[in-house]
Amino acid sequence: MTDIPKLPFSKTRKVGSTLYLSGELGFDADGKIPEGIEAQTRNCFARIRATLEGEGMSLSNVVSCTCFLTDKADFAAFNAAYAEHFSDPLPVRTTILSGLMIDARVEITIIAEA
């Protein structure tokens, strides 16, 4: 697993019935960031799904996503992988082009409502 120091924020925060999830990167089961935006996006969602399930929720509870991409050329492939995880009603979404830590190509943060 990648050695990540303790950072000064919470992974999740629940306020009433609303769950806020800090940004997830696309680490695989071995703690590595794979090549390719599709694999990283799917890994982000696997980690998000596990966190939601730990809170008694699922992806259907997600009302908002903020997504960070490092390369606008990845946008179409990201959208295709992203779309695999949601059905109507779709969450609102903002996508931002930005630099990311640990050479990740995507980071996703969500807000879910129980």
Image (cartoon, grey):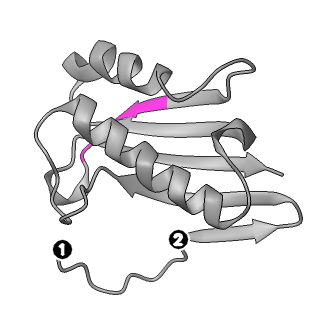
Q: Residues within 10 Å of mark 2 (few under 14, many from 20)?
A: few
User: What is the secondary structure assignment of the residue under circle 2?
Assistant: loop
Q: Which residues are magenta?
A: 95-99
Considering only vertical position in the picture, is 114 above or below 41?
below
Corner quadrant of residue 80: top left
* Residue beneath disc 1: 1
Name the side, left or right, on which 73 lies relative to 52.
left
- The residue located at (63%, 58%) in the rendering is 53
Q: Identify which amino acid the numbered label 1 is placed on.
A: Met
Please tell me the numbered disc located at residue 11.
2
Q: Position of residue 33 (x, y in %)?
A: 17, 53
Extreme-top residue of the structure = 76
Q: Earlier in the sequence, mark 2 or mark 1?
A: 1
- The three-letter amino acid code for the residue at tag 2 is Lys
| Label 2 vs label 1, nearer the camera | 1
Quadrant of image for the N terminus: bottom left
Res. 43 in view: yes
SS at circle 1: loop
Q: Main secondary structure of the magenta part?
A: strand
Image: 52 above or below 43: below
Residue 70 in sight in this render = no
Q: Position of residue 10 (x, y in %)?
A: 55, 76
Pick out the residue farthest to the bottom: 6
Of 71 and 19, the residue lying toward us: 19
Residue 73 position (above or below residue 100): above
Identified at 59% across, 29% down, the residue is: 93
